[in-house]
Image (cartoon, rainbow, N blue to C red):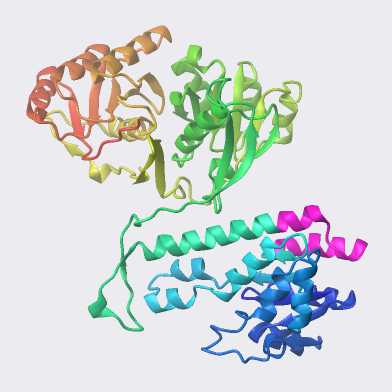
Amino acid sequence: MRALISVSDKTGIVDLAKELHALGVSLISTGGTAKLLAEQGLPVTEVAEVTQFPEMLDGRVKTLHPKVHGGLLARRDTPEHMAALQAHGIDTIDLLIVNLYPFEATVAQPGCTLADAIENIDIGGPAMVRSAAKNWKDVGIVTDASQYPAVMAELKASGKLSDKLRFALSVAAFNRISQYDGAISNYLSSVKFEAEKLSEEYVPERAQFSGQFNEQYVKVQDLRYGENSHQQAAWYRDLSPAAGSLATGVQLQGKELSYNNIADADAAWECVKSFDTSACVIVKHANPCGVAVGATALEAYSKAFQTDPTSAFGGIIAFNRPVDKAAAEAVSKQFVEVLMAPDFSAEALDVFKSKVNVRLMKIALPAIYGQVRNALETKRVGSGLLLQSADNHELALADLKIVTVKQPTPEELHDLLFAWKVAKFVKSNAIVFCKNGMTMGVGAGQMSRLDSARIASIKAEAAKLSLQNTVVASDAFFPFRDGLDVVVDAGATCVAQPGGSMRDQEVIDAANERGVAMVFTGVRHFRH
């Protein structure tokens, strides 16, 4: 057996080569890899010796040769192929171990020059990978150090790789090439090329959205069905998921997550992790129906549940702090589909042992709450894709512009920031009543802002919550004074809205007439 080794990332390669040598595998290698293996006392043949042609053009041409690709591509079960190899003095290559130039890491560095990016586009590596992967029945193709243990386990056990492993390695190889080429395409089609600035030090300006958008995802699991039972579905994650995102979570118990569970869980998790104090979010049909902060997980949950106990039935619950026994016992009294937290105490896990269908998800949060999120958001439309930067805007007190005669109190301002944070995660049109770090009424997803305001009031009344002296956040401006009148009639004393309407002054005058405070945020949070 012969193995060709050519790796940019040399992690674990010496140990692998030693194990291969111990099994009697002949080693062929290139450039720096060959030098490293020779320094470790391993007998290694350089590719230039195999091809009888020197590496040239600063190493750009070394493996692009019939004696390499012939050895990889020849089918062992085809007499004509084997005869051609013999006629031209070509030996077969049975194992290829390659990882590619670090293009992705290079272009991710601040100040990366165009020259550095281009130089880190691998040519020979992908060509060899494709050759070996195509001929998977005869050649094992290893493209990542994580594959080394499985390869060595089979070689030690039987002296060869199984068809199953070789095919899996081939699939992984083509996936890697797809990712690599996609990254190159994304980079190059984002470059705003300026010929007059070309030099080795030229750092090109790049468009935020590339001319071609290539994105890769890895399947997490197949799902029983989609939003409805007649639809098929699967869950995929990013190749490199953001720290603290739903895709990084581990399910500790419960039934398999459904399509709707995952969609709702993401809404709850993204909302709860935006708070830097102990918080609880309850979501139903992608909308927060109860959100609160508290001194403990139990207090936050108890307040959130009060907002809308009816909608909380069968909901998704998320905490941004570990769940202890007290919080677990309170949650266990209601029907919950999914419960998420950074961690669960042993006592909390015991509480749910008898509730085998409840899905418990443990998701490690980053050190700084809410600061690691997806950079881009996508929405599929007919034969196309909408792509936008994620709505990660955080509102600060200094951003608020007070536009009324009445000034908000410090308590009202604190609650306004809380309400505004919640409104960002409520489907438009969104109206959110809050008081003392707790949602008091939520109106979501209506065609008119007026209807959302009315529904929020109706929800609060059904939950027997008084809206007197509450604050209100509206995700977009009030186009007329009628929506403002509804929330003030319900008991609101302070309102936050983006502003920007042709009738802003009319709404400001109405607020002054009603004796309430109003602030403009200068930014809206539509969520469709």
Image: magenta residue range:
145-169
Q: Give the residue at x 58% y 69%.
A: 126
Residue 378 coordinates in the image, percent (x, y): 41, 42
Q: Is residue 405 above or below residue 453?
A: below
Q: Which quadrant of the rendered structure holds the C terminus?
A: top left
Residue 387 coordinates in the image, percent (x, y): 36, 45
- Of the pair 103 and 333, the residue shown nearer to us: 103
Q: Which quadrant of the rendered structure holds the N terminus?
A: bottom right
Residue 212 coordinates in the image, percent (x, y): 38, 55
- Of the pair 144 and 369, the residue shown nearer to us: 144
Q: Is residue 381 above or below residue 393?
A: above
Q: Give the residue at x 33% y 13%.
A: 455
- Of the pair 177 and 256, the residue shown nearer to us: 177
| Residue 64 as seen in the image, left or right of residue 466 | right
**Magenta stretch: includes residue 158:** yes
Q: Is residue 4 above or below residue 402?
A: below
Q: Give the residue at x 38% y 75%.
A: 114
Res 3 seen here: no
